[in-house]
Amino acid sequence: MTHRIAVIPGDGIGKEVMPEGVRALKAAAERFGIDLELEPFGFASCDYYAEHGQMLPDDWFEILEKFDAIFYGAVGWPETVPDHISLWGSLLQLRRRFDQYINLRPCRLLPGIQSPLAGRKPGDIDFYVVRENTEGEYSSVGGKMFEGTEREIVIQETVMTRHGTDRVLKFAYELAQSRPRKKLTSATKSNGIAITMPWWDERVSEMSGHYPDVTVDQFHIDILTANFVMHPDWFDVVVASNLFGDILSDLGPACTGTIGVAPSANINPEGTFPSLFEPVHGSAPDIAGKGIANPIGQIWSAAMMLEHLGYQEAAGAIVAAFEEVLSEGDVTLLTPDVGGHGTTESLGLAIAERIMR
Ligand code: GGG
């Protein structure tokens, strides 16, 4: 069976880490006899915008819906396109139209990487952030009045639906149920955001009855962020709204030493549409062009994609390969964010070589 993968590097370091993600994917496909057909696309990037005045072609949905999965790099080049235009014109369109309502973001302290939190070792930090991915604070419902005048008014609504909330909570409960600790933490801010957030809390409580073996904690987001730093070992599965999930899934990997290794899966669990796999990090204009971006976030995302397509063993081989390279700690191969003076390519090559062993 041939799996068709759309490959979209996007912007900035997306263009640098993507070749290493593809290298890892090809190595795993060769070793495990997986038939992958990779098709590259230049759209969903600010370069495409510069040429066409939009981030995506008009027929992007018809083009991409035929693929089994989408492998994405990063979006954003604020020098040429404002961030809200590039993000809303690309990634957020894809997540919504393909109903990728789960954004699954593992957060794990990897061997060989120093956590900035004193005394933490691999095994101490190992949890998932499950981020609601199609509604919430990312609604774009709102508008401006009296723009540019003293009377200017700006309004943007948060949209939470029973359908959208229950389905992400169900996914998170089931994920917690499948893990040894069976623990779910829900992030809200119910004292300050006093309509939507207490309602989310009620949905969490009501659904807990269906999962009696899962222990549930509910935290306000402010103290939860403090506890990510002070007690990252408390967490197993953390479920949050679109915005809070986005923030937590940057903070979590930061506690594991670098956001450069963090992967994510934007999943349409029903398989009606393709799911999308991308590193958590963005296009990082500050280091773009230097060839020093850590490719592990992209490579780990490739593993999540293979797992989604049913290739657990191949996915495991990719994870084992980057864990081995990190454990060895050869500073000539590792990128600067993990203490080395190697390059995106040197680290990617070393990982691909281990995958093939
Ligand atoms: N690879 C992910 C990426 O490019 N992220 C840019 C970003 O700002 N994303 C916001 C979001 O995930 O909602």
Image (cartoon, rainbow, N blue to C red):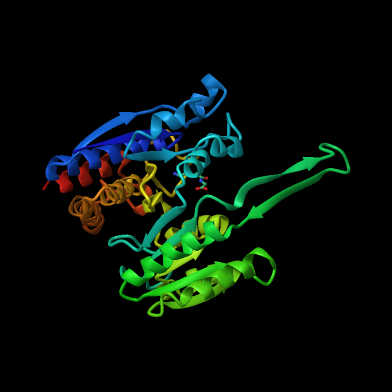
Q: Is residue 245 visible?
A: yes
Q: Is residue 303 left or right of residue 133?
A: left
Residue plotted at (38% across, 70% down) = 176
Q: Is residue 220 visible?
A: no
Residue at the top extreme, as displayed: 51
Residue plotted at (47% across, 26% down) = 59
Q: Dividing the picture into quarters, in which one does residue 162 lie?
A: bottom right
- 240 shown above or below 73: below
Work out whether residue 223 or residue 87 is closer to the camera in this orientation and state it: 87
Q: Is residue 327 left or right of residue 282?
A: left
Tell me where residue 36 appears, x and y as whole percent: 22, 36
Q: Dividing the picture into quarters, in which one does residue 70 lie?
A: top left
Residue plotted at (30% across, 36% down) = 5
Total count of labels: 0
Tell me where residue 72 appears, x and y as whole percent: 39, 39
Residue at the right extreme, as displayed: 150
Work out whether residue 143 or residue 119 is closer to the camera in this orientation and state it: 143
Residue at the left extreme, as displayed: 357
Q: Is residue 148 left or right of residue 339?
A: right
Tell me where residue 27 appears, x and y as whole percent: 18, 41
Work out whether residue 232 or residue 113 is closer to the camera in this orientation and state it: 232
- 219 shown above or below 47: below
Q: Is residue 142 left or right of residue 327?
A: right
Q: Dividing the picture into quarters, in which one does residue 1 lie?
A: top left
Residue plotted at (35% across, 40% down) = 71
Tell me where residue 294 appears, x and y as whole percent: 36, 46
- 306 shown above or below 56: below
